[in-house]
């Protein structure tokens, strides 16, 4: 089901989002570690598409920071803070999802 802003409601589709997000996020991580500038930009844009489809605004902001860093690239170390924020976002999203799905109402 889509919302007003054309994003897919995440409550029912969070497992699918996490699966797609992990795949896209992994590509970003690999390209970052390999310092593949063009591939990194492409993988970030794919991740933005996934985030937009599911309505994850915070993820769009984080990806925007990475893309901005790619455009203003002075060295790879300048991208590390944005990559750390993306890592943290993924970890918290995954942890919160696991806690939520493990919760049972008596």
Image: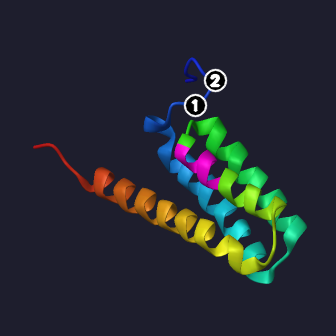
Q: Mark 1 points at which residue?
A: 8
Q: Mark 2 points at which residue?
A: 6
Spot occupied by residue 61 in the image (x, y as percentages of width and height):
60, 48
State the image quarter where residue 75 is shown.
bottom right
Closest to the observer: 20 or 68? 68
Residue found 56% across the figure and 36% down from its top: 55
In the displayed structure, does residue 28 sit left or right of residue 39? left
Spot occupied by residue 47 in the image (x, y as percentages of width and height):
70, 53
Residue found at the far top of this picture: 4
Number of numbered discs present? Answer: 2
Q: Indicate the quadrant containing the C terminus: top left, top right, bottom left or bottom right.
A: top left
34 in relation to 56, above or below: below
Spot occupied by residue 20 in the image (x, y as percentages of width and height):
64, 53
Other-residue count near label 1 (Cα within 10 Å), few / some / many at <14 / 14–19 / ≥20: many
What's the magenta region? Answer: 58-63
Residue found 57% across the figure and 63% down from its top: 86
Closest to the observer: 11 or 89? 89
Query: Is 35 within the magenta?
Result: no
């Amino acid at each position: 089901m889509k919302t007003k802003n054309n994003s897919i409601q995440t409550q029912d589709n969070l497992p699918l989002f996490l699966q797609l997000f992990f795949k896209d996020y992994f590509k970003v991580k690999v390209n970052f570690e390999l310092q593949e500038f063009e591939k990194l930009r492409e993988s970030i844009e794919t991740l933005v598409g996934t985030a937009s489809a599911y309505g994850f605004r915070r993820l769009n902001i984080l990806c925007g920071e990475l893309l901005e860093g790619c455009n203003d690239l002075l060295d790879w170390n300048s991208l590390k803070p944005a990559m750390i924020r993306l890592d943290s976002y993924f970890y918290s999203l995954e942890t919160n999802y696991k806690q939520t799905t493990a919760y049972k109402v008596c």
